[in-house]
Amino acid sequence: MVRTMKFILVFSTVVITILSSLILDYAAEFNEKLNVIVLGIIGIAFVLNILKFVVWGWIHKNFEVSKSYPLTSIFFPLIFILAYFKGDVDFSVTKIIGLILIVSGLIVFENKQKIIK
């Protein structure tokens, strides 16, 4: 149960990071100078990052950093998938191998934690 909660909290920080990035990417598409919409979008990203900061503070207070921070590497496969759907990147053998290695590393890391306890 504790592992599940740790994963959910870390995963939520990764999702917040991705949402913040998407929001800022959207704001960058405006050709106008700073206007109310862009400032609002930047404000939303700022609030999301404050939320992420608070969640990470709680994670660091309740879990060992060495057992929680490596889980953030799930960011890379998720951002790759998002970039693919946006048309920013294409699949290649080396990219797929890299994604498989990252996910495999996460699986080994989590299973090692279970075996040790």
Image (cartoon, rainbow, N blue to C red):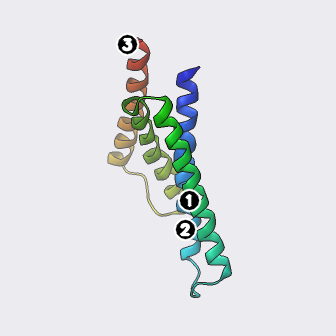
- Specify the quadrant that holds the C terminus: top left
Q: Residue furthest bottom?
A: 32
Q: Which tag, 1 or 3, sits closer to the chain's start?
A: 1
Considering only vertical position in the picture, is 83 above or below 13?
Answer: below
Residue at x 41% of width, y 31% of height: 106
Q: Which residue is mark 3?
A: 116
Type of amino acid under label 3: Ile
Q: On residue 24, which mark appears?
A: 2
Q: Which residue is mark 1?
A: 20
Q: Which tag, 2 or 3, sits closer to the chain's start?
A: 2
Of residues 57 and 110, the one drawn nearer to the viewer in this rendering? 57
Q: Quadrant of residue 36?
A: bottom right
Q: CA distance from mark 2 to mark 3?
A: 41 Å
Type of amino acid under label 2: Leu
Crowd class of label 2 (few under 14; some 14 to 19; many from 20; radius 10 Å): some
Q: Position of residue 80 (x, y in %)?
A: 46, 51
Q: Position of residue 110 (x, y in %)?
A: 43, 24
> Could you tell me which secondary element the residue under label 1 belongs to?
helix
Crowd class of label 3 (few under 14; some 14 to 19; many from 20; radius 10 Å): few
Residue at x 48% of width, y 34% of height: 61
> Could you tell me which secondary element the residue under label 2 belongs to?
helix
Residue at x 41% of width, y 37% of height: 69
Of residues 108 and 10, the one drawn nearer to the viewer in this rendering? 10
Q: CA distance from mark 1 to mark 3?
A: 36 Å
Residue at x 38% of width, y 26% of height: 109
Q: CA distance from mark 2 to mark 1?
A: 6 Å
Q: Position of residue 66 (x, y in %)?
A: 36, 31
